Amino acid sequence: MTNNGFFGPKKTITLKVLRYKPGAIDPPRYDTFRVEANAVTTVLDALEEIKATQDSSLLYRHSCHPASCGTCGMRVNGREQLGCVARLLEQGSDVVVVEPLASAPLIADLVVDMTPFAERFAPAGMRLVRESEFNPEAETPVGVETFTRYEDCIECNICLSACPVANTNPAFIGPAGLAAAYRALVTGERSPAEVFAYVDHDDGVWRCHSAMECSAVCPSNVDPGHKIMALRRELVTYKVKRFFKRG
Ligand code: FES
């Protein structure tokens, strides 16, 4: 440790970063870099420093920096995280392994193709670009103490990467799509018949093994795992009601 600054002592951290460039670095390998980190240094800060001072060919995605755009998802020491808020000194070791998200085709270094994620996600009725819903006049309704939020998915693909089912079954709709389907159902954005047609099959709501890894890694408190369980309950109720109506 060196240099006691405003954000505490600095420590040298070794980053092992997965590198892949089709035709140039192929097959993938791990390159080793060293950076000085203090208590607020994030993994994205470290990657930006490496790119600026050690290897300008390093590729990764980012945009906003405060965990709202969802572009900087990556695996850090085996755990899906947003690089822009993952603190380097909180990763449990002085050697930090940085890898791209799983369950998405690798394009180069830490950059994955988000197209398959968007294709699974979009049919749930969640528009990929939403209009602002900020309402400056909004007040907490009298007697309401807590809210369940439905609008917070930042489409980062982290849940899909952490999901053990999605990693072995590319046809599985996945946590984000199923959570969006539940939202579309309870908000009335889509009819029950539309939502259940989308999720009621072997690669839909029944494929989830309830591992809850998606909820554990979601950086936006969407809690997809419990939304999937709630969607199952809604679907069973819908089917039972239809059965007795017919009878
Ligand atoms: S850079 Fe936007 S979420 Fe990390």
Image (tube, rainbow, N blue to C red):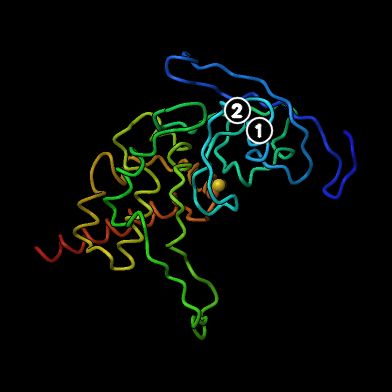
**Residue 187: x, y in percent?**
33, 68
| Residue at the (72%, 40%) spot, across then down | 90
Task: Look at label 1 and name its amino acid.
Answer: Ala
Image disc number at residue 56: 2
Badge 2: residue crowd in 10 Å (few <14, some 14–19, many ≥20): few
Quadrant, the C terminus: bottom left
Circle 1 sits in a helix, a strand or a loop, which is it? helix
175 or 17, which is in the foreground?
17
**Residue 235: x, y in percent?**
27, 56
Circle 2 sits in a helix, a strand or a loop, which is it? loop
In the displayed structure, 74 sits above or below 193; it is above
| Residue at the (48%, 53%) spot, across then down | 223
Quadrant, the N terminus: top right
Mark 1 sits on what residue?
52
| Residue at the (47%, 40%) spot, across then down | 211
Badge 1: residue crowd in 10 Å (few <14, some 14–19, many ≥20): few
244 or 219, which is in the foreground?
219
Tell me where residue 130 sits by quadrant. Answer: bottom left
In the displayed structure, 189 sits above or below 104; it is below
User: How far apart are labels 1 and 2 at the CA level?
Assistant: 6 Å
**Residue 245: x, y in percent?**
12, 66
159 with respect to 95 (left or right): left
232 with respect to 54 (left or right): left
Task: Look at label 2 and name its amino acid.
Answer: Ser
111 with respect to 171 (left or right): right
| Residue at the (70%, 38%) spot, across then down | 88
The answer to whether the residue labelled 1 contacts the one labelled 2, judged by CB atoms less than 8 Å apart, is yes
